[in-house]
Image (cartoon, grey):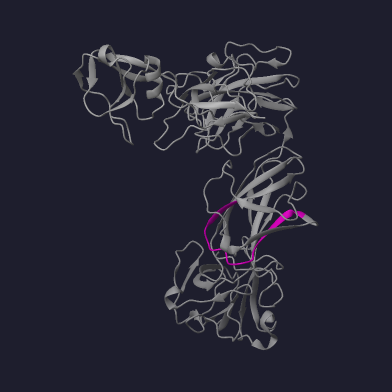
Amino acid sequence: LVPLESAGVQLLWEPGAHVAAPTYLYVHAPIGYEWQFTASDWTALVATTGSVAAPLDPNTFTPAVFPNGTFLAGHRHILCINVSRDIARDEIFYISARIRTPRENPNGLQASGLLPAPPLWHIELTSEPLSSSEGLQKMVASLSSRRLACSVLFQVPNRIRRLFGALASPSNMVVGELNDVTIAVTTVTEVPMGGTVVIEAAEGAFSFLPDCHVVEALASASIKVGLALPESAGSVCKSDATSPHRAIIAFTRGALPPNQYIFTLQDVRNQRIVSGDDLWTIFTTLDAGSSYADHGVSFTAFAVLEAMSDAFIDMEILDVTSARFTKRRSAQNEVVMSFKQSIATPAGQTLTVYMPEGFRIMWKDSDDCLAPDLGLGVPPVNVATPFGSATADEAVFTTLPEGIQISCASSTDGGVAYLTLSEGLVEISRYYSFRLVVQNAERSPPANFWRLQLGQQASRLIPGFTMQAFMLLGIAPSVLSASQAGDATLPNLVHVTFQPSVAVPAGGALRIKPPLGFDLVPAVPRTSRGELIASKSRCVGESLVLGTGYTFEQCETACRDRPSCDFFSVGFAAEAGACVQEGKVGGGAPTPCTTLKASATFSVYRVVLTGNCFRFELKEGT
């Protein structure tokens, strides 16, 4: 029930006794409710055992007044029905009307200042009208006029809700560890400025920091849908030392509108082992000091388990080629995971693999994940040769039981893998290993950690691997000796060979960062050579004389030193020693020599770079 809104009420009444007319039937709703209906909202039916219900004559069974059936000033929670017909012992009455819900539950501290009242519906059948002289909370008939009376408790005692549902997702399921808990909650009405959202974890199992940190939801959380808490609301989180399992998020600058929200509470301490069935509760209050303002929503959160002895991703033992391990971005990859149990695991348990943001499962759910997936051509899981052609030390590693069967499934978003094992795992002194097919993330995630859960134990955070941008990357220096400060020797030209693992869009860049002790020197001379393209020829177009009396090597160098020079001609015979730049000689891009003309005294050469186009000088710093 949403606060301060109209709701339907259906009352089934079985008197169980004969009562002669005239009488008055009073339906007392809990304090704070107000009957609000018109004649069209009102229906009253009657039936006897074994018969079909039929409408009652409105002249013999109807509200005392319309539009809302209440006539006692200040007592809008009491409905009065005039009954001018006898009531039979075996009759059953069906009454429908509408009522306005209160701002808060009646058994909480009331904003109106009234004392809390139990969430009871009280029904009286009297021979005389009620009097309002006894006060609001004592509106009951005298014993002499009362014919019938009963009380009915709500099926769920607290029904007024500002919250519809909630979920929680952990970043760490190990007892004793800090945990970033992501909460998703749906509000159905506004939480006013100064109001709060209160989160109660299992008492003694979790503790929040006194100044608990509320941040935007972690990208690695399994919960994905919802809005961040608006900055305009001014969310401030506190926890009391006497109740460290309770976090109170107050909205200090504005109201929280109805919507679906998601946020993370950082550094929650997992204090003891709990099952996944333990309930958390979330509710709202009207201000930081009040009690329940609505019906708290209880929800199962997550388990806190024993820590595995160890778990890691192997990148040293495996044979990269046969194990098909790669750090390429967005590539199909096979990740080798090893874990050492702290307790033995019985058969039929599920090994859950939580992956960092961006990693995804590529295979289809299957009852036999040791067989090749039709789409991938390889098994989703490999337990026989997890390291490929490499072998591990048998004193440290063991294999999963012979004949084990593994069924596998994944979460809706593909970020979690569920591997159900047909056999139990009894080894606790050596590592088990398996290889899992995944799709790598497009980039290294900010929270680059994996997690495992198996039976009653879970791993601590497992550091992941960094995505590589290159399938091929090599560096070859031309000089290995160190240079000294003020050294006038030629710079060290480092040749970088690379092949991107993904397409680099226009505007992309190659960033090269030398290690400590080296400096990038921006002015690096080109190295090139002249390649003959035509003898006894000249290029058609512009030209510029670079000098006379030059040797071939001097002319080659003169052209290389000019960025606009891509073609040059060298004279012989009568023009011996002449050096001419061919093509465009001004600023801008050079003009290629595409057309030749005959010349008895010149030959044309093209400048060919002897290194890569992108070249850097690395000079050891002082």
Viewer-side residue, 376 vs 425: 376
Q: Write the residue at 66% across / 82% down.
A: 136
Range shown magenta: 244-263
Q: Is residue 459 positioned above or below 284 on the image? A: above
Viewer-side residue, 64 vs 322: 322
Q: Write the residue at 67% across / 51% down.
A: 280
Give coordinates of residue 81: x percent, y percent. 53, 80
Viewer-side residue, 111 vs 518: 518
Q: Quadrant of residue 246?
A: bottom right
Q: Is residue 424 positioned above or below 65 on the image? A: above
Where the N terminus falls, by quadrant? bottom right
Give coordinates of residue 111: x percent, y percent. 66, 74
Residue 341 visible from this viewpoint: yes
- Give left or right: position of 346 versus 511: right
- Give left or right: position of 297 versus 227: right
Give coordinates of residue 3: x percent, y percent. 56, 68
